[in-house]
Image (spheres, helix red, strand yellow):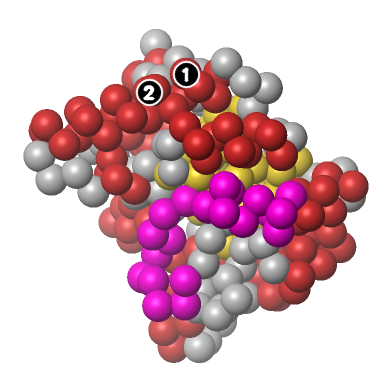
């Protein structure tokens, strides 16, 4: 069964719109767990646009399932990760002007910097994943660094405008997944997935973990977090059976 990670960043986005105390990402994480989430994911950005430092502290203490800490390969974030020792760290790129993460890490270009970050995290006993585009060179570079997993960026697939584009992007994900399966890496995926497009990705045989945020948070406004997570879990389950 594919693990479902629920990214709760946008619970904090709503709170930060008023700089108040609600909604609480920790409460949202607890409800997601009740709905069947296998993992809670949160991204602490350098610009602190949604998740804050105190959220990461609270989540690290409260989450009962796996806790996946997303962050950039920067000293400040690495120090937080090594102190809190989450179950998993997923290193992601950041651009201050972006609305959301626009692409995967360029592991090829920034190999030395990322390698140092990976080594530091692993020395602290942390499982490391790299968020990469479904490209041969990036996956190969990630494997060379000895990380435990890669998370394939599904943004191009999720943003496809036509059925033809959708199939082309799905094919890229399938080819990349086969490359990952032939390596020591474990396969994760996420970004932009929703209730309408998740099943074709979930059918990729090698896939172990999906991380989904915005769509589930949006759905939770209508049906509640527990139900929103259960609905997504059911769609994934139906896809793989």
Residue 8 drawn at (x, y percent): 51, 58
- State left or right for residue 119 relative to residue 156: right
The rendered magenta stretch, by its main secondary structure, is classed as loop
| Mark 1 lies on residue | 178
Q: Is residue 137 above or below residue 75?
A: above
Question: What residue lies at 19% left-to-right and 34% top-to-bottom?
Answer: 166
- State left or right for residue 123 relative to residue 137: right
Question: What residue lies at 89% left-to-right and 50% top-to-bottom?
Answer: 124
Occupied quadrant, residue 56: bottom right
68, 164: nearer the viewer: 164
Q: Which residues are magenta?
A: 95-115
Residue 237 drawn at (x, y percent): 41, 22
Q: Quadrant of the C terminus?
A: top left
Question: What residue lies at 39% left-to-right and 59% top-to-bottom?
Answer: 102
Residue 211 drawn at (x, y percent): 49, 43
Question: What residue lies at 42% left-to-right and 54% top-to-bottom?
Answer: 103
* Disc on res. 174: 2
16, 139: nearer the viewer: 139
Q: Dot 2, how many residues are within 10 Å of its Cα: few (below 14), some (14-19), or many (20+)?
A: many
Where disc 1 sits, the SS reads helix
Circles 2 and 1: CB atoms closer than 8 Å: yes
* Disc on res. 69: none
Q: Would you say residue 31 sits in the magenta stretch?
A: no
Q: Is residue 175 above or below residue 192?
A: above
Occupied quadrant, residue 174: top left
Q: Dot 1, how many residues are within 10 Å of its Cα: few (below 14), some (14-19), or many (20+)?
A: some
**Residue 62 in sight here:** no
Q: CA distance from mark 2 to mark 1?
A: 6 Å
- State left or right for residue 35 relative to residue 86: left
């Amino acid at each position: 069964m594919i693990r479902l990670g629920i990214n709760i960043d946008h619970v904090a986005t709503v709170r930060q719109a008023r700089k108040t105390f609600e909604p609480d990402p920790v409460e949202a994480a607890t409800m997601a767990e009740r709905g069947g989430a296998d993992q809670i994911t949160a991204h602490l950005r350098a610009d602190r646009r949604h998740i804050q430092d105190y959220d990461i502290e609270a989540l690290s203490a409260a989450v009962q399932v796996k806790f996946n800490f997303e962050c950039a390969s920067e000293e400040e974030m690495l120090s937080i990760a090594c102190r809190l020792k989450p179950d998993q760290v997923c290193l992601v790129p950041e651009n201050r002007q972006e609305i959301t993460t626009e692409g995967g890490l360029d592991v090829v270009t920034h190999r030395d910097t990322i390698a140092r970050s990976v080594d530091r995290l692993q020395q602290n006993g942390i499982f490391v994943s790299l968020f990469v585009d479904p490209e041969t060179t990036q996956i190969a570079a990630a494997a060379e660094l000895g990380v435990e997993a890669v998370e394939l960026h599904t943004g191009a697939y999720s943003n496809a405008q036509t059925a033809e584009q959708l199939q082309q992007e799905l094919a890229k994900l399938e080819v990349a997944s086969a490359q990952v399966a032939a390596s020591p890496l474990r396969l994760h995926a996420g970004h932009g997935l929703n209730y309408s497009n998740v099943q074709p990705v979930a059918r990729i045989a090698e896939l172990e973990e999906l991380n989904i945020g915005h769509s589930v948070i949006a759905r939770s406004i209508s049906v509640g977090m527990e139900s929103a997570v259960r609905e997504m879990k059911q769609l994934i389950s139906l896809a793989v059976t």
